[in-house]
Image (tube, rainbow, N blue to C red):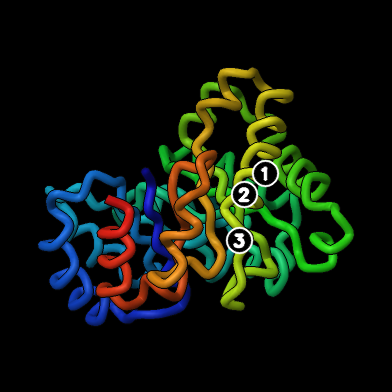
């Protein structure tokens, strides 16, 4: 099972060091794949402290260009060199606040794969789309636009995170049955566009207000391979509690 933490714009390098010093020694026997997606400034600290452990480091964004006049951006080669093994792409905050469109997300995935990074592609519907029963339509469009030009063998390095926008940071979350319905939609899209085997093998995780108090409920979903955890992961005790519940 994949457990991916998104620190968002939180924790300085010193705070990240303190977090890892307390966290790493307590997950030595953890059976799950743990990925901590840190701010850019903390990647080197993460790389140094996680060497020799089973914990992987991820980044939260990547530029859709490999080089050139992109002031303030970070490319795939830089992320890989800084220790990132994963990168989050298409998060709803990037789509809305930073106006990232499907074409840009598609380019980012290709740039990440080119440099050996695993992609965490975020997809999900907003509240209006949910209430008008357009979830399946939205997921299909987002996935197909993001994966244009991607080969089936590259799906091995892509995890799809079902992250309903209406559940992010709201304390609300779909039921385990609803999560499974959406996960099945995702797998069906992959099956139709690539192959049945690809649809079965693709890693799908759930994100959206995952925290210790609801992990028992959402973990009843059977069609997912793990979780993307946001705010709750900022306290390592919360993350440890979630991991303990999932054992």
Q: Residues within 10 Å of mark 2 (few under 14, many from 20)?
A: some
Looking at the rendered image, the disc whose residue lies closer to the viewer, 1 or 3, is 1
Identify the mark at residue 91; answer none if there is no mark.
3
Q: In the rendering, at what x and y percent does residue 186 appear? A: 66, 39
Q: CA distance from mark 1 to mark 2?
A: 6 Å
Residue 239 in the figure: left or right of residue 96: left
Residue 48 location, quadrant = bottom left
Residue 68 location, quadrant = bottom right
Q: How many marks?
A: 3
In this view, 18 is above or below 71: below
Q: In the rendering, at what x and y percent does residue 192 appear? A: 73, 23
Q: CA distance from mark 3 to mark 2?
A: 23 Å
The secondary element bearing badge 1 is classed as helix
The secondary element bearing badge 2 is classed as helix
Residue 174 seen in render: yes
State the residue at coordinates (64%, 18%). 195
In primary-sequence order, the first of circles 3 and 2 is: 3
The secondary element bearing badge 3 is classed as loop
Label 1 with label 2: CB-CB less than 8 Å: yes
């Amino acid at each position: 099972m994949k457990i991916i933490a998104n620190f968002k714009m939180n924790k300085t390098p010193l705070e990240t060091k303190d977090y890892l010093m307390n966290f790493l020694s307590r997950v030595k026997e953890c059976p799950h794949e743990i990925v901590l997606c840190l701010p850019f400034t903390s990647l080197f600290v993460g790389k140094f402290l996680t060497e020799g452990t089973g914990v992987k480091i991820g980044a939260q964004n990547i530029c859709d260009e490999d080089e050139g006049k992109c002031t303030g951006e970070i490319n795939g080669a830089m992320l890989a060199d800084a220790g990132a093994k994963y990168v989050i792409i298409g998060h709803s905050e990037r789509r809305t606040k930073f106006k990232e469109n499907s074409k840009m997300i598609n380019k980012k995935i290709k740039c990440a794969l080119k440099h050996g990074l695993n992609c965490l592609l975020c997809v999900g519907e907003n509240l209006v789309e949910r209430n008008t029963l357009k979830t399946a339509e939205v997921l299909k469009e987002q996935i197909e636009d993001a994966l244009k030009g991607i080969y089936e063998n590259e799906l091995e390095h892509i995890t799809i995170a079902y992250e309903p926008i209406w559940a992010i940071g709201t304390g609300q979350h779909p039921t385990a049955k609803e999560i499974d319905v959406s996960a099945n939609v995702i797998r069906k899209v992959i099956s139709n566009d690539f192959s049945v085997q690809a649809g079965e093998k693709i890693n799908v995780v759930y994100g959206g207000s995952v925290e210790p108090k609801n992990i028992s409920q959402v973990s009843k979903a059977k069609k997912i391979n793990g979780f993307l955890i946001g705010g709750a992961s900022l306290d390592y005790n919360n993350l440890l509690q979630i991991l303990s519940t999932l054992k």
